[in-house]
Image (cartoon, helix red, strand yellow):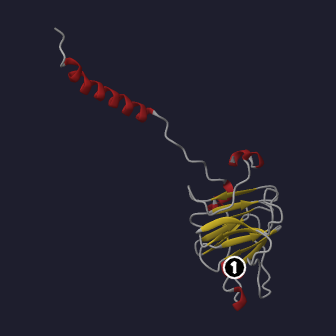
Amino acid sequence: MPDLAAPSRRRPLLIALVLALGVALIATAAPATAAPVPSELQFGNYASVNAKKYQSLRFADNGRTFFTAGQWRCQIGPQPGSVACKGRPATAPPRTKGVAITNDLQGPWWVPPGTTYRFGSQAGFRAPVLKVGQRITVANTVCAVPRANVVSCATPNRAFIVTRAWHKFYFPSGDRAHSANPAPKYLPARLR
């Protein structure tokens, strides 16, 4: 007569063996690696400037900080986590006026024509030049000029890099409050 209890005695042993094998496979799997931070966003590599020289004290500008870098006209503020640059990379939608991050909650967004978004001083403040290799920090926002006609800006959760030829946006995983990145074929190989 066959032993009917034998399969039930083997089941815990089989479960233990499968679990042990699963743990061994997980332990030997290569850990996921994060993409390296692009050099444009390694702000510690750039010389800091005195942000007060870039801030308009005029009432109409509401405490904004302004700078120019090549073709880009940028502003930081007035709220923490807000930054924008006027200009259009080749990968931006047609007629785009610029890019903006708002209060570190939304963006980077393309600013289309016909909106009420304003770029630049409303009081005639002449924005100083932020030179190649320099960075400016205001509250929780930092911008740098890594190379000629390249600007990179970041808030605690969002960032953008704009050049004449391409752009790259960074935002939290799962976020939907931003404009799209270009197809990888339009980006430098290191950013794909």
Q: Residues within 10 Å of mark 1 (few under 14, many from 20)?
A: many
In the image, is 132 to the left or to the right of 48?
right
Task: Count every numbered label the image shows and give the total.
Answer: 1
The picture places residue 128, in percent across and down from the top left corner, at: 77, 77
Quarter where residue 17 is shown: top left
Residue at x 69% of width, y 69% of height:
100
Of helix, strand and loop, which one carries label 1?
strand
- Vertical relation: 26 (above or below) 41: above
Quarter where residue 125 is shown: bottom right
- Residue at the front extreme, as displayed: 1
Residue at x 82% of width, y 57% of height:
90
Answer yes or no: is residue 58 visible: no
The picture places residue 3, in percent across and down from the top left corner, at: 17, 13
Residue at x 75% of width, y 78% of height:
118
Quarter where residue 134 is shown: bottom right
The picture places residue 170, in percent across and down from the top left corner, at: 63, 58
The residue pinned by badge 1 equals: 65
Type of amino acid at the residue the image marks with label 1: Thr
